[in-house]
Amino acid sequence: MELPTQLKRKHGFVALALVAALSLQYLTSTQQRLLRENARQLAEAEEANNFQRFLLQISAKSLEDEINEEFATRYASAAAAGRLEGAIAPTQTDEQASHAIREIQPYTLQDALEESKVWKRAFGILVYDPERDIFVGHYNRKNKWLNCNKKLFNALRTLAFILRKVFPDRFCGADCDELVIPVGAGDAPHVYKWKLPYTSGKAPTLMFGSAFRDTSLYSNMIAMPMPTPLHLQCFGQWAKNDGTEVCKLLQSSTGEGVVFFDDLGLKWNDLTPQVVSRTTDFTYLPTLQDGKNDGRGWRFLEDRPIPSRFIHEGEPTEEKRANAIQALNEQYDTLAPRWKAVALTAQAELDAGKDELPWANIKLSKFSGGRGKVPTVGSDAYSQWESVGIATGEVMGPQELAHYKYHIDLAGGGGTTWTGTVDKLAMPGLLFHHLSPTKDYIHDRLKPWKHYIPVRPDLRDLKAKFDWAEAHPTQAKIISEAGTAFMRNLGTLEGFGQMYDEVMVEPLRRIIEAYQPISKLQLDPEFWSWKDILKANKEEPVIECTGLSSGRFSCKMVQNQSVLNWEKYGTFVAR
């Protein structure tokens, strides 16, 4: 797949700029300002459309497989006739699909170093040091040290523990060879976009976070559990307990865990027939957007639209609200997904009036403030939106959300929602799964139209999918129950154990077998140790882990002054 050359403006906008420049001398200053503003908005809209097409191109393969109206029709017919299993199996049985683990070709330390050139941050090289019998995480000196590195170091800590726990004979001190594994982490891959598609890599790169849905974008990337309590920490607990206990977050409960049907005694027909979501207003896929900063932090898809561009003071409230909704619809293609959902909800509320129930109830309940997530309701930042009844909504907990029939896991910073998908699968209602250019490790275990109903990246088919579900309640309920059953199975010893083996153990086993240590290469070990090669490539040791536990004290940051300053100021300076 070839990416669009650079998401440039079309020739028409260049011509417009020339005409504007020639005309400026004949216009008043106000007219000049308006002309410049119009030209800028047109150019931004075109770039936004180009970027949206870029996103659709990235996930085109998934769209072809998953968003298929004919497939939905066949599914509906088969479901009604009681022939579900035959309708939902595309090419493999579920058992075969869940065991489809990628082959890993032999690779060397030099191959691992090549991966470092693709990343701009949140990427490390984990090395087992036989002489010291520890695992050492390396970070390239060219890369910025940012807050997202915390996710990387959490991933390295748990990975070191699982490696030693599962493969103790491979990590036996001086009698064993080094092992080198490239590791990325973060909301999405922090790679140089101009390097994509990246198809020449040999070393398997473990991505602890959302990975590319289209594997041809980064052919040797392996999606791993996200470094959060609900995902990677559960894998670490499983290893710690020798496979005898599943973490409580995946257990049926009415407290901190996922919420199931029988937890609340809810019945399908009692659920409110709306698509509901309470989500955080968060930036969308910043690592994939070319980005442009004109003082407003503007991106191709707006994460937080400026209220004054949509809401005009001085108008009567109802007129002001209607005009704001119209403006959102006109700018729909330039909005980030969560704001697209806001626009759909606002239009649904307007169409429903006071007597009917709107089909959508998707609100922004929080936003990223200076000190974490802040409620939108009552905040100065969203007061204009709140004054016209658009976008803002009260926070709703899992038990309250569970009373709705339809849910959607709107994509966030990494293009997915790390907790939303599994939480909403477990709930009594049906999940509309929002497809994007990225996916999480758990998505490969789910099937469209069996566990969820897929929705396009631009959400333009969400209303149609809602109408389909309302028109086919039996089939919708069956899909909902399949999603819930999937989550229930993950909370069992057998279900989580199978996922642990397939997602973590088998890929690591293949990586260990594929790595070619220095001792097997035709290099003079006196001059070419793995430490010398890493140092020559500006890979700096920054974290050391014993691998003896998954606790925070099993690792320590390297305390030399260069690393301390790097962490403090963000840029490496040799001392």
Image (cartoon, helix red, strand yellow):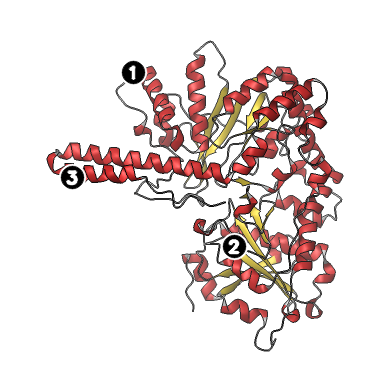
Q: Residues within 10 Å of mark 3 (few under 14, many from 20)?
A: few
Secondary structure state at the residue bearing disc 3 = helix
Answer whether residue 170 is visible to the viewer in this image: yes
Q: Is residue 363 above or below residue 542?
A: above
Q: Position of residue 11 (x, y in %)?
A: 34, 45
Of residue 572 and residue 27, the one placed in the foreground of this image is: 27
Q: Position of residue 343 (x, y in %)?
A: 48, 28
Q: Which marked residue is nearer to the observer: mark 2 or mark 3?
A: 3
Q: Find the distance from the CA under tag 2 to the CA under tag 1.
A: 53 Å
Considering only order in the chain, which callout, 3 or 2, is on the residue closer to the N terminus?
Answer: 3
Q: Residue furthest bottom?
A: 526
Which residue is labeled 2 in the image? 123
Q: Is residue 70 above or below residue 57?
A: above
Query: Residue 488 vs residue 538: left or right?
Result: right
Q: Quadrant of residue 42?
A: top left
Q: Which marked residue is nearer to the observer: mark 1 or mark 3?
A: 3
Considering only order in the chain, which callout, 3 or 1, is on the residue closer to the N terminus?
Answer: 3
Q: Position of residue 58 (x, y in %)?
A: 57, 46
Q: Residue furthest top?
A: 355
The disc label shown at residue 22, or none: 3
